[in-house]
Image: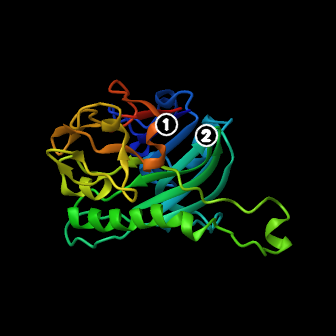
Amino acid sequence: MRMVGYNIQYGTGKDGNVDLARIADDIGDADIVCLQEVERHCSKTGMTDQPAAFAALFPDHYWVYGAGVDTDAATPDDRGRRRQFGNMILSRWPILSSRNHLLPKIQYIDHLALQRSAVEGVIETPLGALRVYSVHLGHVGAAERCAQIDALMEIVFAAPERGGVVSGRKASAHWTADAPLPPMPAPAVLMGDFNLAPEDTEYERLVGGENGEYGRLTTSRLLVDAWTHLGHPLHGGHSCFEHFGRSQRIDYAFLTPDLANRALAISVDAEAQGSDHQPMSLELA
């Protein structure tokens, strides 16, 4: 099973042109796709409904979209139209349930701050039921990212205990007439733009600290960085070549520890031209 994570920068490539078909070519024949910076109805990108456009580009995939930023873009002819910015999941298999989690936000006086989010999809895959999160954290301050990571970790690890989006053995026929109650499985994959480098303190909030004698001290309520788990160097896999004037790894694939032994391969396509980020591909057995 191949998964791809990609911050698409609204489809704007390194040449400055908006080309969603080029993004689709970069992704290729992936089973599950996690996109960030997908927008709707912005004049800078031709007022395109990008989630609908990607649905058309991947006609064999199911999809969900979650907006972080949601503002007015109504017209007299379309009073429900919204200007949105958020994350998307596309899946070869049905997405049994979805939730859009808004993450903590800080108001910076001078610097752009966007409402960030993580869209969740519960998917019945050949590996069994799996939670997938397409994640985008704040780009400005570590304090905001730390708050967002704390909220995200609570979401990820508390979800199985709290159950699916509809739960209860005595659920009425109103909720069971169309499909069984959706599960909330423990295994989860988080892919996206975390806007942090491995040397940043926020990284340890996700995967645990490192001990010179014992290595990475991961616990059952921390995540596994698939890149390093598969033997790649901590500071390799650069996914953004012009992040504050230097190349860095700021896009990640994280796994709950129960999925670590399913990871087969991970790579970053350094040649892709569709965005200011590079797509990351993860293979699970």
Query: Horizontally, is 240 left or right of 191 in the view?
Result: left
Query: Horizontally, is 78 left or right of 133 in the view?
Result: right
Identify the colour scheme used: rainbow
> In x, y percent, where is residue 87?
48, 53
Q: Which residue does the image show at 18% across and 52% down from the upper left?
A: 200
Above/below status of 204 relative to 23: below
Whether tag 2 and tag 1 are in contact, CB under 8 A, the answer is yes
Mark 2 highlights which residue?
127
Q: Which residue does the image show at 62% across and 68% down from the upper left?
A: 79
Q: How many marks do you count on the picture?
A: 2
Name which residue type carries label 2. Leu
User: Dividing the image into 4 quarters, which one contains the N terminus?
Assistant: top right
The residue most toward the top is 271
Q: Secondary structure at mark 1?
A: helix
**Figure quadrant of residue 139:** bottom left
Q: Secondary structure at mark 2?
A: loop
Disc number placed over residue 226 in the picture, else none: none
Classed neighbour count for the residue bearing mark 1: other residues with Cα under 10 Å, few (<14), some (14–19), many (≥20): few
Disc number placed over residue 262 in the picture, else none: 1
Classed neighbour count for the residue bearing mark 2: other residues with Cα under 10 Å, few (<14), some (14–19), many (≥20): few
Give the mark nearest the N terminus, 2 or 1.
2
Q: Is residue 72 visible?
A: no
In 3D space, how far apart are the residues under numbered discs 2 and 1 (Cα atoms)? 9 Å
In this orientation, which residue lies closer to the viewer: 195 or 174? 174
Query: Horizontally, is 80 left or right of 195 in the view?
Result: right
The residue most toward the front is 213
> In x, y percent, where is residue 33?
52, 40
